[in-house]
Image (spheres, helix red, strand yellow):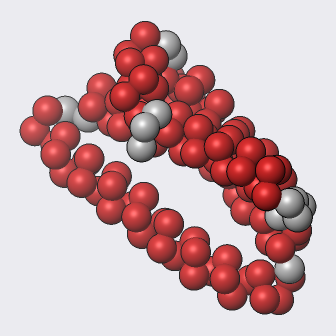
């Protein structure tokens, strides 16, 4: 939460696609590492990287929505975006809780990190398609 204002300013000055990519990489690294740690210090470090990744990703995507969506649909788009974030957090926690009982923390968090990388690939493909549509 604290990082959203400075990252919002950064999103106004930098390529938002790169900020989303950097945020998703931070999420992937932090999640994969989090399943491996057993001490408080490394856990806190993973939490900071995870929070930075979420701040980068969520803020930059919000700015992209405001930039790419027509004004009459912006409120609906932002509402859906926030709903998807919270639905994803809720369902992700539920699924992770069930999965961790079966596969354990190291594998479970590595899989969660992999999902973040898959989201990065999907985001990159979608943004490339959008740029091609705008150019042609």
Q: Outermost residue, left direction?
A: 72
Horizontally, residue 1 falls left or right of residue 72, namely right
For the N terminus, the image quarter is top left
Q: Outermost residue, top direction?
A: 13
Name the residue nearer the viewer: 72 or 108: 108
In the image, residue 124 above or below residue 89: above
- x 83%, y 64%: residue: 35
Question: Where is residue 94 drawn, in percent x and y?
Answer: 57, 81
Q: Is residue 94 visible?
A: yes
Q: Quadrant of residue 109?
A: bottom right
Question: How many callouts does the rendering have?
Answer: 0
Horizontally, residue 68 falls left or right of residue 114, namely left
Question: Where is residue 69 drawn, in percent x and y?
Answer: 26, 34
For the C terminus, the image quarter is top left
Question: Where is residue 83 drawn, in percent x and y?
Answer: 33, 62
- x 48%, y 73%: residue: 90
Q: Is residue 130 visible?
A: no
Name the residue nearer the viewer: 87 or 8: 8
Q: Quadrant of residue 48?
A: top right
- x 59%, y 38%: residue: 52
Question: Where is residue 3 drawn, in percent x and y?
Answer: 46, 34
Horizontally, residue 4 falls left or right of residue 83, namely right
Horizontally, residue 11 falls left or right of residue 122, namely left
- x 52%, y 76%: residue: 91
């Amino acid at each position: 939460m604290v990082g959203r204002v400075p990252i919002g300013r950064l999103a106004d000055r930098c390529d938002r696609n790169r900020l989303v990519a950097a945020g998703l990489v931070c999420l992937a690294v932090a999640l994969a590492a989090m399943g491996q740690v057993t001490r408080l210090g490394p856990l806190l470090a993973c939490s900071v990287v995870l929070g930075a990744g979420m701040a980068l990703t969520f803020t930059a995507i919000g700015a992209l929505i405001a930039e790419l969506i027509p004004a009459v649909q912006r409120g609906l788009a932002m509402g859906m975006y926030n709903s998807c974030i919270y639905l994803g957090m809720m369902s992700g926690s539920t699924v992770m809780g069930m999965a961790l009982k079966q596969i354990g923390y190291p594998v479970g968090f590595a899989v969660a990190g992999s999902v973040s990388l898959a989201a990065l690939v999907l985001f990159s493909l979608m943004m490339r398609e959008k740029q091609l549509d705008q150019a042609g």
